[in-house]
Each structure stands twice: as structure tokens, then as C-alpha cells.
Amino acid sequence: MEIIVDQRIELLGVIQTLCGYWDYFGQKYLGKTHYQCTYKDEVIKYFEKYKKHETLKLYNHLCKEDPDISHYFQFILILGYSELPELNCITNYDNDYYFYLSQKSNWKAFAESMKTFYKDTNFKDFFYNNKNKYEKLLSDFGNKDELINWSNLIFNYLSINNDNNYKIIISSLIMGCYGIKIKINEILTMNYPILSPNDYKNNKYLFDYGEPINHVLWHEISHTVINDLTGKYIDNFDVKNIEIPEKIKNIGYTNIKTVIDEYIIRTIVYLLTELSEGDKSAVLQYEYEFKLGFTEIENIKEYIKENCEENNKLLKDDNYIKLIKYVIEKIKN
């Protein structure tokens, strides 16, 4: 497992920042603009003369044309391309999401245009000259050895036997945290938990999401496994008319499959907190989730321990189908 600043995400973040994407996103969904930091000031100062670049015009046009296009989609798009400067498409479009992605020809044109922006702006030099700022960001994120040790807990629990295809991406230009999975071919899959600070004070990046950073890391790594598991079995259930709790809808989860994923992942984080950090930390984690509207994680945790777990590992297949059924029943109630 690596913890890195990725040039592809950073280049996308620069374009999004220059186009005001994250300030718009923050105001619309979080009621606040993106925080300021010296690095963001450097970005705006350096790239100011490129504000009329064709790549920025294309990006603004695409966002206007498809205003509901998600940042999650944009991350998947760019991470499906090789490293800069080549930025060649390397994704195997063999599932529904990638098929949808492959049809977005205008966004594929944007990915091509990013290569031009990279060259015209000498982004390679900009990235190299800010190496110290990236090292500062990674240092504020946490001690690498400790984070890897914490990550091993979730790798073990989910039976992830090879962590070499996990790259934890940290960026100070984006907002939020995500778990991205890119299938390169029939053999290789790359996993990219993406995390960002949510503030910058006293020359320090803050990763303060109301829970410890290792819990956030567990959460995003879990997405790379749980999303697929739920997707594999969700068609066994009629979920069309399930009412999502209002509190959960208010924090942006309006798709029932996503809510099921979130409930299971948040319960796993709660379970691992109790297992590795003790009751006191587990209570704080429970209270945090309860405030967000995930009121059933205690019941789901006990169900997992009794029916879907063996030797501190999550059981899959039939056991996971039972878990989905139980979570659906709890959401209905």
C-alpha cells in the first residue's frame, strides 16, 4: 500500500479549482466554500494566466451541460487513464458503470484536453516545485507506518490478501473522501481511497471529520469491497419503494443501494473500533454515526458477529446475502 499525492488527481483538482467547482459544490451541499491554504493560493497565482485555456472552457461547458455530473465520476474517469504525461485510457469497460463512462465522449475529449493543459502550463514543473507542500500534506495526514498498520486491520477483516494494488491518494484541492475501484484488465484492479483535509489552520492541514482519520481510511477502503458485494446480490431484493430515512437523505444519500453500502461499512468501522480500540472509542463512534442518522449500527453489528463473521473476518456469499436482507429490514423499520 502506498500513500501518495497523485499527479492526475492534482491536475484535475487544479482545473476544478480554477473553474470554481469545489466552491460551488461546497456551497450547494455543505453550506460553505472550500477552505483557503497557501498551496491553493499558489495554484491560483501560477495558473491565472491560463484562465482562458481551452481545457477550462471545455470543463465549464461540460459541467453546465451536465450539472449533476458527480466529482466521483470525474475521479473514475481520470484514474482510468495512465500516469501523466501519456494519460492513455487503460480502463477495461466491462461493467455497467464503465459502459456508462465510455459513452461520455465529451468527457473523454476532456481527458484528452488535460494532456494539452498539462503541457501548455508546464504542470510537470509546477508539481515538482511544490514537492515540499505535498510532503507537508502527507505529514499532516499522519505517520505512514501507523496508517499502514491501521489499514492492515481492515485488509484482514475483508480478506484482502494483496494490498499492493491500493494507493491512498491525498489532495488538498478537492473536498470529501471516496473509495474508487478501477478495473484495468481481467487480472489487475487498482483501488484508490481518496482523502482530503477539511480545513487548514496555523500552517497545518486538518483531517477532522468528527472521527479519527484511521476510521475514515477503514471506511474508504471498505468501499472497494462492499460496493461490489452489495451490487452482486442487490437484485435478489425488491428495494424500489424503500423509504430512506430523512436524516440520511439530508446528508446526500438518496440511493437505497448506497444507503445499504453505507450502513454495512459504517457498522464494520464501528465493529473494528470496538475490537481494536475498546469500548470508549466504540461509544464515540456509535454516537457519531447515530447523529448522522445511522441509528441501527448496534443491531447490525451484533447480527454480523452472530451470523456473518468468523475469526474476525467478514463472511461472503450466502452470509452476505443474509446481511443485506437484515439491513433492508432495519432501514424499513
Image (cartoon, rainbow, N blue to C red):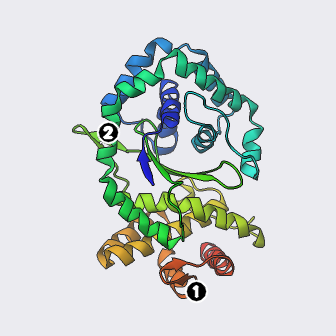
Asked if residue 11 is positioned above or below residue 188 in the image, the reply reads above
Q: Tell me the quarter of the picture where residue 240 sits.
A: bottom right
Residue 303 coordinates in the image, percent (x, y)? 54, 83
Amino acid type, label 1: Asn
The image quadrant where one finds the N terminus is bottom left
Residue drawn where x is 75% and y is 44% of the image: 100
Residue drawn where x is 53% and y is 34% of the image: 8
Residue 207 coordinates in the image, percent (x, y)? 34, 49
Which one is nearer the viewer's eye here, 176 or 222?
222
Which one is nearer the viewer's eye here, 328 or 230?
230
Residue drawn where x is 23% and y is 37% of the image: 203
Q: Which residue is mark 2?
A: 135
Dot 1 falls on a residue whose secondary structure is helix
User: Tag count in the figure?
Assistant: 2
Residue 8 showing in the rendered view: yes
Q: Residue furthest bottom?
A: 306
Residue 20 coordinates in the image, percent (x, y)? 50, 28
Asked if residue 309 is positioned above or below residue 140 in the image, the reply reads below
Determine crowd level at label 1: few under 14, some 14-19, many 20+ residues with C-alpha closer than 10 A. some
Numbered label attached to residue 307: 1
Asked if residue 170 is positioned above or below residue 109 in the image, the reply reads below
Determine crowd level at label 2: few under 14, some 14-19, many 20+ residues with C-alpha closer than 10 A. few
Residue 64 coordinates in the image, percent (x, y)? 65, 28
Dot 2 falls on a residue whose secondary structure is helix
Q: Is residue 9 left or right of residue 137?
A: right
Residue 290 showing in the rendered view: no
Marks 2/1: CA distance? 44 Å
Numbered label attached to residue 168: none
Amino acid type, label 2: Glu
* In front: label 2 or label 1: 2
